[in-house]
Image: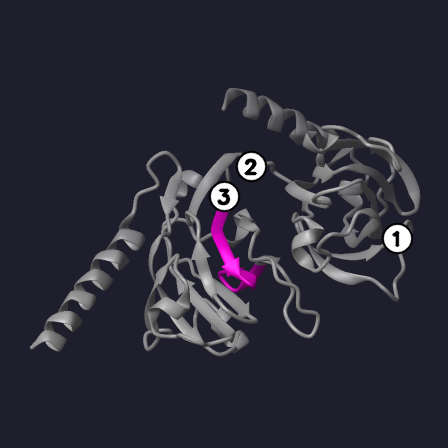
Amino acid sequence: MKKIITIQWIMLLVLVGSLKVSAAAFGSNEQSLNGMWKFRIGDNMEWASPNYDDSGWNLIKVPDRWENQGYNGYDGYAWYRLSPFIPASMKNQSVILEMGYIDDADEVYFNGTLIGKTGSFPPHFSTAYKALRKYQVPNNLINYDGKNVIAVRVYDAQLDGGIIAGDLKIYSAGFLPQFDINLAGEWQFNKGRDYNESRARPIHVPGAWENQGYFGYDGYAVYTKKINVSADLASQRLVMLAGRIDDADMLFINGKYIGQTGQFGENNGNIYREFRNYFLPPNTLKPGENRIEIKVYDSGGDGGIYEGPIGIMTQKKFREYWKAKRRN
């Protein structure tokens, strides 16, 4: 009889937790994601797909160690899935997904697209269990007033595992820049003063490099990304928003120096708090393929392009963006 009562209580808690997550209103543009998530140990990239049938998966409380929920002693890969509701009123907002603290490394997919990662998976394993996960959700990935799927791939090397702590939520960070080219996502990255193709590895932007396999690194590094630009856009007056960078940076486009914030080789104080906005001289971008290069110097602590927004827009849109920010 005791066993039956226990199972009934578990099912009741699961139902309440699931309703709490799926039915939560944004209220002040914020939705809590704490509660019951779908969960499965193992690793299969098909599990990132929003169309994957996860009806047979177990339920697990988030946040909490998976060792406390029937997976004691398990080390390795596991996946979490959840379907949040995002209202159409969020369309012009910058939507942030906060995933708390994950032990050890993670990749987060929104409707099948990778939107961020922290730590590094094998064979270049690096833990980031102390890092708070915050990922911007690209506006074009969101199904407003419809089905959305968050899929979280986790790797745990030892001891505690999973989404272990924090306040999980989706919320608005304010008015969304209407970029002509959104530069958030995968870039190429290498340590040193200059780009080195043979040593470059993918890195997610925005995100501190300490949380992506370069823990404890201070000094010089280079971010590089190739983009395709239409002839119409290339002919316009443009602005590149490069987010917040820790500490100093220099921007080059197609090998041409555009501008910088801070000084390399020096202690730049609180300059890491400044948003980088670079006005591009006419014809800086060419029709077709272009190469963006951001050189960074970090004197200590976290380093790199750690916070967005990052992208390219016309000067007209840039002025509208700042007017909207002041109104909101």
Judging by the rendered image, the residue that carries numbered circle 1 is: 192
Dot 3: few (<14), some (14–19), or many (≥20) neighbours within 10 Å?
many
Which disc, if any, is residue 176? Answer: 2
Determine whether the residue tagged by mark 1 lies in a helix, strand or loop. loop
Say what amino acid the circle numbered 1 marks.
Answer: Gly
Left or right, 80 with reference to 108: left
Q: Nearer the viewer, residue 153 or 3?
A: 3
Determine whether the residue tagged by mark 3 lies in a helix, strand or loop. strand
Determine whether the residue tagged by mark 2 lies in a helix, strand or loop. loop
Say what amino acid the circle numbered 3 marks.
Answer: Val
Dot 2: few (<14), some (14–19), or many (≥20) neighbours within 10 Å?
some
Residue drawn where x is 43% and y is 70% of the image: 51
Q: Which residues are magenta?
A: 97-114
Compared with 313, 325 (above or below) is above
Judging by the rendered image, the residue that carries numbered circle 3 is: 95
Residue drawn where x is 69% and y is 74% of the image: 123
